[in-house]
Image (cartoon, rainbow, N blue to C red):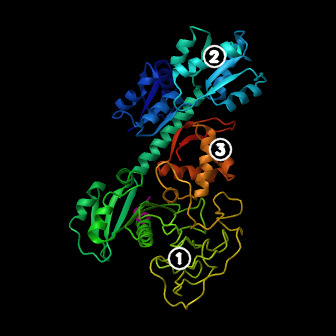
Amino acid sequence: MPLTVGVIGPEDLVQKVVAVGGRAPGSARLLPLPYRHEDETTAVVTGARSRADALLFTGVVPHALADAAGVLDRPAMYVPYNGATLLRALVELLRLGHDVSRVSIDTLRRDDVLETMTEAKLPTDRVRVLPYRPGLTSEDVVDFHLDARDTKKTRVAITCLGSAFHVLEQHTHAVRLAPSRHSILATLQALVLATAGQHSGDAQVVLGIVDLPGAGPDARLPEDIRVLGGSLAELPDGRRLVVTTRGVLETVTERFTRLPFLDGLAARHGTAHVGFGVGRTAAEAEALARRAVNRARWVGMAAGAAAGVVSMADDVDIVIAAGAVDAAGAAGVAVGSVGSVGAAGAVGAAGAVGAAGSVSSAGGSGAADSVSSAGSAGPVGSAGAAVAGGATGALDSAGSAGSPNSLGSPGAGGSAGTPGAPGPRGSSGPAGSPGSPDSPSSPVSAPQTHAGPSEGPALLARRVGLHPQTLDRLRELTAADGGAGVTAHRVAEHLSVQQRTARRILKRLERAGIAVPTGSRQEGQTGRPPIVYQVRL
């Protein structure tokens, strides 16, 4: 069954988008959802919930209004107004004999406007630009253009807002921009792919393992996990197996931020460790579930509380429930191939990280990635070394050293040793080379002081699987962009990383509900326009 995409905007632009998009081969079914004024956007979106799988807005303004109202509960993007759209309008104005050196332009980014006009060899010193920002109203746009006419002597008002255009055309020469055919098709294709991918992802198999240490049968457990809409079975080792799907798990856990029944389990049994594995196959989901429950056991023991973890491919571990993080960084920070410390990068009870990313619950470590619980500094970013802990091969304070990549209780057979001596920082390695934005400049266990809007820095870093320094740099970038959104290209430039790394970072933020794809933007490159993300940090 084809996807249904609701097209929201003023009636004339909705008709254009439907006409252009409807002729695209293999496209979705387009559902026109016009409004008379952008103030009706929220009501239109709410009314379309049962009829549309995704929403395509004809511009940034209605999308921003719907986003601010909190009614976007499905994939949604907007058709961007880029330099090509502006250039077409300028050429038409020149053909009609207008002075395009004295214009006022709203909604578009100032950099895009100046770049387009400079490339067209047009003067820019008398061009006035009002970039879109959250909260900008139609009245604000009209006032901007009329003020530019009166004080800056502009001759033409170029607007992207239909309601503003109808007012401006009564007072000055006004031109209304409309999205180009290329922008419509590119954004529609990106939206269809994102929606199809989400639907496919929602159907991914999820296996969960519930570990209740020392507890017997729990008659209330079936009732607890009923919210997951799955089945429950007992494993040979006494643990319980839960079968569900990613879409249900993501909804119930509010995008992997909480686990409703964990507190109840902890209250009845003293503690509880729950791990979910999200995989493309049952075998992959089972392996990830076992990794997750082991990680949850370790996090729970380190924090002295019940814990839940979701493990995905690409070494992504998301702690969805755990105790408070103490100043020593007792709770772990899961990082994957982006910003990883060591090869897989799980942070241990003292903030230490092994080369294979596994740390025993009592602080014992494998021979290849052992960590001293005394927390002495080891080489940062060196191949196969610990970030905060003893040198490679050092023993824990109890003197026990386990086998490589052990996860759980400390291995046996080691003799007592001394804490590792401090090692040099910044040595090159596979995941922490010098200059990388994710290479920590201080031991990972050091407490961070930057926090997101609704959660502490350690919790946010742990949930998205990125180093706090990277999140701080991303905050700088989003603040500088003024709400216009970021692309993988901009993230790569700002963090000095490759674009595939930047795309992976944005995907992590999207998984955690912090980044939302909103459209595409032509940035002077050939090929498909990059996806624009709104990032809330």
Q: Residues within 10 Å of mark 3 (few under 14, many from 20)?
A: some
Q: How far, Cα to Cα, is label 3 from label 1?
A: 37 Å
Q: Position of residue 69 (x, y in %)?
A: 42, 34
Q: Are marks 3 and 2 in contact (CB under 8 Å)?
A: no
From where the camera sits, is residue 20 visible?
A: yes
Query: Which numbered tag is attached to residue 296?
Result: none
Q: Closer to us: mark 1 or mark 2?
A: 2
Left or right? Give the position of 269 relative to 473. Answer: left
Residue wearing tag 1: 405
Tell me the SS state at disc 2: helix
| Foreground of the two, 324 or 288 | 324
The segment highlighted magenta reads 279-285
3 or 1: tag closer to the N-terminus: 1
- Residue highlighted by disc 2: 147
Residue positioned 63% across, 45% down in the render: 477
- C-alpha distance separating marks 1 and 2: 67 Å
Numbered-mark total: 3
Q: Quadrant of residue 85?
A: top right
Q: Residue 463 appears at what percent x and percent y? A: 48, 57
* Rendered residue at 55%/90% (across/down): 416
* Horizontal side, residue 244 vs residue 139: left or right: left
Label 1, secondary structure: give it: loop
Q: CA distance from mark 3 to mark 2?
A: 33 Å
The residue that disc 3 covers is 490
In the image, residue 258 sits, relative to residue 164, either above or below, namely below
Q: Earlier in the sequence, mark 3 or mark 2?
A: 2
Assign a secondary structure to mark 3: helix
Residue type, mark 2 in image:
Asp
